[in-house]
């Protein structure tokens, strides 16, 4: 009996342990398979295309090594797009942060009553509710030569003739950046507002007891408390803004004269109008590498926070 | 973890990946084309036409074909134009193109390079098809790979009220008349004389609003199938368009305007004249029923007496090179190009039949269609971008360089030389 028991019990125990051990893998498996099929495989394919010649458009694409990367990185148009992306991204992220912080401080202030606060909250969040297509149409109407902005500027004699904001090479990059800032600040505002509401009141009380002014409280209490959120939001925003495509495509298409050309629009044009999927893949991989670098910093900051 | 266990896991992961890849490949390459046990054949027809025709009209046309050919079933795969181009490109290389494919002329060159399209010249020869009834064919290296089914022409639209206010009684017939009329509209009304959409998101303004001036005077931007942008005809046309821009008779915001902006501004009476597709007549009538407008041929160079080329866009048709049922697919193409069917589909689409013996039925339709048909018959359909490699990219290159010139950066001659060099790389 004993021998039988000792023979059976480890077996039962082993099966149960194996089942318990494999259960988490079973739960994760569907997601893992989907991720592999929808993310890992395409990324590997794109990397493969980027080192080939005639990907997608020819049946037997030949190996091209780093040729596509060299061609892109020695093309002034690519660097023009990279510079535009940098200006667009840095301006947008800084403005998103400043406007988001300003509005969140205002919405968190006790100087404003509950009703006006709720109204402002709805108004300020509005840009976030619109899709890219609606934002593009809205801003095209606003900035049209016969649009509201030109009417107002002409009414107060700030300009004599209407300005084609999106169509003028000297103002187009500014116009798309302003539009993107408008579209994206609520993300910062909401996150920072949540952060502000989590700052312990006793910290402010202690600061007041120490004789700190309002500005000193902001510098020495509010900002340090918001720092982890600001860093996380800024990194995410850098990633999203670098990849912004829809707003640019729907308003200027990268023009006029390439002044609003971004890495995203260049990649799209290489693929779907030039049918050069190899170069487009190389461009996409370059953006991916840049995004990975930012993502590493993001994960690190998240780790240090936790 | 032991090496054995690790090896087993690697094998399992490899198997999972391979299975996924096989499943994906199988999913991608599945085709609706088939032959049943009783010998009945099913062919697929991918196109965007169904979504642009009244509901069910394309299916009725297909049903008539099936009644006449009981052994062939045609499965319609209808998608919006915007998504079909990308899908056709990828389906071409993966060999999964539908048996019969709706084609824009701009896609053909790339698909032929992929070896995705059947050589229709061979099909015509083997079936003794009379090709003289076709108003045009999309040819690469002398062989036909696509046939336009319906043509949508781009005449000159003029706002009668604005022109009358400017003291103009008849639409302009020559370039100098057009400039004078555009100046008059700009000076004497609150509108601009003309609208030139040069936005690069969809750069078709180069084809419809710039090159149309060249084709209207019988000019060509090609020589022996290769770019020839530095010839006198092109220079004259581009110089002329620049002169209109410099004279400030063109609506503001040219560099980012798109075709829909052009139609909207004309419909709202903000511009006196535009070159546009006949397909927009219904849109304009619906949006502004009070607008009085006419259509006429695009003005030609002063003194030009030859036939005028009129720009067009078309619904083209082709056959997949990988089709297992090429004979049936070609039979369906012949049916679509037959006199009566072609006339019917063009009437439904408010376009013109590409079968030169067919006459569209204008009964109950806007009188401007009949007027446009006379202009179309008096001239010839002209669109030299059809069949060129990466047509959209060629237009975009031209567009960007032209914007620089209009912005005061360099001469027209320099711009044409630069564009000629960039175009040549694509050929």
Image (spheres, coloured by chain):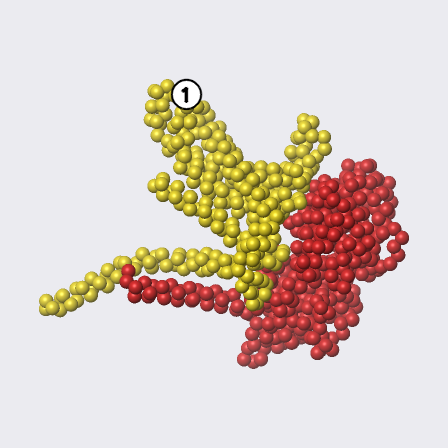
Chain colours: A yellow, B red
- Quarter holding the C terminus of chain B? bottom right
Report whether A123 appears left or right of B373.
Answer: left
Under tag 1, what secondary structure?
loop
Across and down, in percent, residue B254 comes to 71, 43
Q: Is residue A47 above or below residue A146?
A: below
Across and down, in percent, residue A226 comes to 41, 33
Q: Is residue B304 above or below residue B39?
A: above
User: Residue furthest toward the bottom?
Assistant: B38
Residue at x-position 76% and y-position 59%: B222
Across and down, in percent, residue A114 comes to 44, 28
Across and down, in percent, residue B404 comes to 71, 44
Residue at x-position 15% and y-position 67%: A7
Q: Nearer the viewer, residue B291 or B295?
A: B295
Q: Does residue A253 appear anywhere in the picture? A: yes
User: Residue furthest toward the left?
Assistant: A1
Residue at x-position 54% and y-position 46%: A244
User: Residue furthest toward the top?
Assistant: A211
Q: Nearer the viewer, residue B207 or A122?
A: B207
Residue at x-position 49% and y-position 37%: A186
Q: Does residue B65 appear anywhere in the picture? A: no
Mark 1: few/some/many CA within 10 Å (<14, 14-19, 20+): few
Residue B307 falls in image quadrant: bottom right
Residue holding disc 1: A213
Q: Chain of mark 1?
A: A
Q: Nearer the viewer, residue B271 or A260?
A: A260
């Amino acid at each position: 009996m004993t021998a039988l028991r000792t023979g059976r019990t480890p077996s039962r125990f082993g099966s149960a342990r194996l089942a318990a051990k494999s259960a988490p893998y079973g739960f994760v498996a569907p997601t893992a398979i989907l991720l592999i099929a929808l993310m890992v495989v395409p990324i590997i394919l794109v990397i493969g295309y980027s080192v080939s010649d005639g990907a997608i458009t020819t049946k037997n694409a030949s190996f091209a090594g780093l040729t596509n990367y060299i061609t892109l990185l020695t093309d002034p148009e690519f660097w023009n797009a990279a510079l535009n992306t940098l200006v667009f991204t840095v301006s947008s992220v800084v403005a998103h942060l400043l406007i988001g912080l300003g509005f969140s401080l205002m919405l968190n202030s006790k100087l404003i009553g509950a009703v006006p606060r709720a109204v402002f909250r709805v108004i300020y969040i509005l840009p976030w509710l619109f899709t890219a297509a609606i934002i593009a149409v809205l801003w095209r109407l606003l900035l049209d030569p016969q649009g509201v902005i030109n009417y107002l500027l002409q009414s107060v004699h700030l300009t004599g003739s209407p300005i084609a904001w999106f169509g003028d090479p000297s103002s187009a990059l500014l116009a798309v950046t302003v539009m993107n800032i408008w579209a994206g600040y609520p993300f910062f505002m909401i996150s920072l507002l949540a952060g502000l509401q989590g700052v312990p009141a006793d910290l402010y009380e202690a600061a007041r007891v120490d004789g700190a002014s309002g500005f000193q409280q902001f510098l020495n209490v509010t900002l340090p408390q918001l720092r982890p959120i600001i860093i996380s939001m800024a990194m995410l925003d850098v990633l999203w803004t670098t990849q912004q495509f829809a707003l640019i495509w729907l308003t200027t298409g990268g023009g006029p004269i390439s002044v609003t050309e971004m890495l995203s629009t260049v990649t799209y044009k290489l693929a779907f109008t030039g049918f050069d999927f190899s170069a487009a893949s190389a461009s996409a991989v370059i953006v991916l590498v840049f995004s990975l670098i930012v993502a590493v910093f993001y994960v690190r900051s998240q780790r240090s926070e936790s | 973890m032991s090496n054995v266990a690790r090896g087993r896991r690697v094998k399992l992961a490899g198997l999972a990946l391979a299975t996924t890849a096989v499943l994906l490949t199988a999913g991608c390459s599945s085709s609706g084309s088939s032959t049943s046990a009783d010998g009945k054949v099913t062919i697929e027809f991918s196109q965007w036409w169904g979504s642009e025709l009244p509901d069910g009209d394309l299916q009725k046309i297909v049903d008539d074909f099936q009644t006449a050919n009981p052994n062939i079933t045609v499965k319609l795969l209808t998608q919006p134009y915007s998504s079909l181009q990308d899908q056709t490109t990828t389906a071409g290389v993966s060999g999964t193109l539908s048996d019969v494919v709706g084609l824009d002329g701009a896609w053909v060159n790339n698909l032929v390079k992929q070896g995705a399209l059947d050589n229709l010249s061979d099909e015509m020869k083997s079936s003794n098809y009379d090709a003289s009834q076709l108003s045009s064919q999309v040819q690469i290296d002398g062989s036909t790979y696509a046939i336009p089914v319906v043509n949508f022409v781009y005449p000159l639209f003029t706002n009668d009220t604005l022109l009358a206010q400017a003291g103009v009684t008849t639409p302009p017939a020559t370039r100098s008349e057009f400039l004078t009329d555009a100046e008059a509209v700009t000076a004497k009304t609150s509108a601009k004389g003309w609208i030139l959409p040069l936005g690069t998101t969809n750069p078709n303004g180069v084809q419809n609003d710039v090159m149309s001036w060249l084709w209207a005077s019988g000019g060509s931007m090609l020589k022996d199938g290769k770019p020839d942008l530095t010839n006198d005809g092109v220079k004259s046309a581009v110089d002329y368009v620049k002169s209109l821009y410099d004279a400030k008779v063109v609506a503001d915001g040219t560099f980012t305007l798109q075709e829909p902006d052009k139609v909207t501004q004309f419909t709202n009476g903000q511009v006196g004249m535009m070159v546009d597709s006949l397909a927009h007549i219904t849109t304009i009538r619906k949006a502004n029923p009070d607008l009085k407008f006419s259509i006429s041929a695009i003005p030609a160079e002063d003194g030009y007496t030859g036939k005028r080329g009129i720009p067009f866009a078309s619904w083209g048709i082709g056959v997949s090179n990988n089709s297992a049922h090429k004979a049936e697919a070609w039979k369906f193409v012949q049916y679509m190009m037959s006199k009566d069917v072609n006339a019917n589909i063009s009437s439904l689409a408010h376009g013109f039949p590409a079968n030169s013996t067919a006459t569209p039925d204008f009964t109950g339709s806007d009188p401007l269609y009949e007027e446009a048909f006379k202009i179309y018959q008096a001239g010839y359909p002209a669109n030299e971008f059809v069949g060129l490699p990466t047509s959209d990219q060629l237009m975009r290159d031209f567009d960007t360089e032209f914007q620089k010139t209009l912005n005061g950066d360099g001469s027209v001659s320099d711009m044409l030389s630069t564009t000629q060099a960039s175009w040549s790389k694509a050929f």
